[in-house]
Amino acid sequence: MKVGVAMVPSAQVNQYLVELQKEVMSFCSLRPLLGTEFNLPHITLLQGRFKNNFNWLNLISDLRDYCTQQKYSLEFKLSELEYQPPGWYFLTLSPNIMFCEAHRFVFEQLKDSMYLTQEDRQKDTTNYSNLEKENYCKYGYRYIGDVFHPHITLGRSIDKSRIQDEADMINTVKVFTSNIVGTIQKITIYEMGENGSHANTLYYVNI
């Protein structure tokens, strides 16, 4: 089973993000559908396969303590719609050192236990940058280190392609997110579902 470590916004912000995905889907069909109980909107810090049976609750409790001096606020007014091949649409987040520090903390704790199966090695990485390919081939996850950028995945297009004219979709996202302000509510360990989704919460700590 693949698992991930994530920061999850408050219930109110999650509801906004579920509605945002619906707005975006009027231009482009995406999967999986985001929800407020399953397939939660989230900021992934790390995901993959892990050799050891970790005390995951201790890990995320330590992470919460490590980030205690940071602000857990979320502002979306500077957020933008981003496309990543093949077929991914992300909502980038405003620059926030907390996410980068949290990513580094989790990676340092878990990097020696990450591994790939033979099936994982068959994945097409044609569209990855050189560093993303290096990360994936070594750890099974592309967004590590210098290519980690905090984002919330809105979904993946069904045909794994980019729509030709994104102008109206970009404007819809900008208008929808301009007044959204919230907080991070939880740090979670989650079971990865379709397209890396936050399918099921395994462990969590409240912030």
Image (cartoon, rainbow, N blue to C red):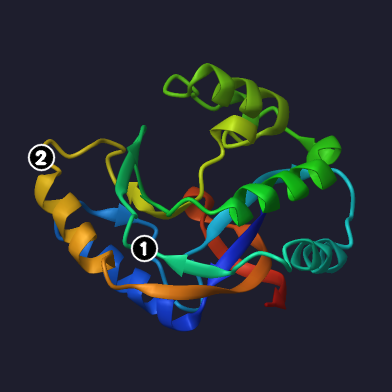
Name the residue that disc number 1 marks: 76
Which image quadrant for residue 188?
Answer: bottom right
Q: Residues within 10 Å of mark 1 (few under 14, many from 20)?
A: some
Is the C terminus in the top left, top right, bottom left or bottom right quadrant? bottom right
What residue type is disc 1 on? Phe
Which image quadrant for residue 162?
Answer: top left
Q: Are marks 2 and 1 in contact (CB under 8 Å)?
A: no
Name the residue that disc number 2 marks: 165
Residue 189 seen from this side: yes
Instruction: Residue at 31% x, 62% y: name it.
Output: 77
How many numbered marks does the figure carry?
2
Q: Could you say where residue 123 lies in the image, as x and y percent from the top left?
A: 54, 27
Q: Residues within 10 Å of mark 2 (few under 14, many from 20)?
A: few
Instruction: Residue at 47% x, 24% y: name it.
Output: 128
Above or below residue 7? Residue 170 is above
Mark earlier in primary sequence (2, 1): 1
Q: Could you say where residue 55 lies in the image, as x and y percent from the top left?
A: 89, 62
Q: Compare residues 183 and 43 and report the one nearer the observer.
A: 183
Q: Could you say where residue 192 lies in the image, as x and y percent from the top left?
A: 60, 55
Q: Residue furthest bottom?
A: 12
Q: Could you say where residue 201 lies in the image, as x and y percent from the top left?
A: 64, 70
Residue 2 seen from this side: no
Instruction: Residue at 28% x, 72% y: name it.
Output: 179
Q: Nearer the viewer, mark 2 or mark 1?
A: 1
Q: Is residue 101 left or right of residue 79?
A: right
Above or below residue 46? Residue 38 is below
Callout 2 secondary element: loop
Q: Give the Cα distance between marks 2 and 1.
A: 23 Å
Above or below residue 118? Residue 171 is below
Callout 1 secondary element: loop
What residue type is disc 2 on? Asp
